[in-house]
Amino acid sequence: MNDTATLRGDYRNIGPDYAVWQDWDAYTPEQHALYRRLYERQSALVPRLACPEFISALARLNAGAGIPRFDEVSKDLKAATGWVIVPVPGLVPDEVFFEHLANRRFPVTVWLRTPEEFDYIVEPDVFHDFFGHVPLLFDQHYADHMQEYGKGGLKALRLGGLKFLARLYWYTIEFGLTNTPAGVRAYGAGLLSSGGELSYAVESPQPARRPFELMTVMRSSYRIDAYQDQYFVIDGFAHLLRETAPDFTPLYAQLVAEQGGANA
Ligand code: PHE
Ligand code: CO
């Protein structure tokens, strides 16, 4: 999926697992200030629009002063749920990504968007990866789910099911909504890190909000360059874990028969 030659980011010093050193001292004051502005905008939206697990994890993280030091956050995260952050130059090959997740390591991009990209960015940067994904790794259910997802990814690669598993990832981990006692709220990282799509997804009358149904999700293609026209709503992380726990082998076989494979 990812031809690293065409990707944004510096891939010259990667290890075999694509890990790099987070050269924290190399971030400029302007970059920290830009990160802070992104953080302030998003954290102001969170009380109204994010799921409760994200709200409490974000408060506990207290990482709004600038681009976080991954090694410090990893210490807390390791103690909480056994996860660590792995600094990466940008997108990594699918197999590398899944291998990290399967071992409770979350890859986080080291570079930050430019000021011109304040409102919208297609490729994940450090703000998306950190603000969107890391807080929920403090939640036990979510943390376990991400590891299962990683193992499931390695399996999907073997079975030609990646296209379908990628849709599940998209509509849950990136753009998922959940029912809460207070109403529908966001837990997907693509929403939580987005200035515009977060309130659109939760509050706008425009998009469809459909109850999560595994096969429907895996049959639904998506766009990466526009707000979604549909979202899928889970009933909490325990529900998501239950729904994704069964063996996907026969499901992939059925989907490939219907729609053609495979790993693209
Ligand atoms: N249960 C899936 C399988 O058997 C793996 C999986 C778990 C996928 C959790 C996504 C989330 O392939
Ligand atoms: Co993401």
Image (cartoon, rainbow, N blue to C red):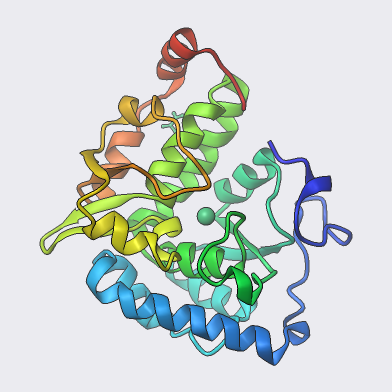
Residue nearest the observer in this picture, 121 or 68? 121
The outermost residue toward the right is: 12
Residue placed farthest to the top in the image? 257
- Horizontal side of 258 relative to 14 (left or right) equals left
In this rendering, the answer to whether 113 lies above or below 245 is: below
Q: Can residue 164 be seen in this view?
A: yes
Q: Is 47 left, or right, of 190 in this rendering?
A: left
From the top left corner, tell me how far across and down residue 122 is, in percent. 58, 54
Residue 56 seen in render: no
Q: Which residue is drawn at 42% across and 37% down?
A: 168
Position of residue 41 measured from the top left corner of the image (x, y, whole percent): 41, 79
Looking at the image, which residue is at 56% across and 81% down? 35
- Tell me residue 202's x, y (percent): 25, 58
Quarter of the image where one finds residue 262? top right
Q: Which of 211 and 251 is in front in this view?
A: 211
Could you tell me which residue is drawn at 53 percent across and 23 percent down? 161
Q: Is residue 54 left or right of residue 86?
A: left
Residue 109 appears at what percent x and percent y? 66, 63
Image quadrant where one finds the C terminus: top right
Q: In this view, does 132 lie above or below 252?
A: below
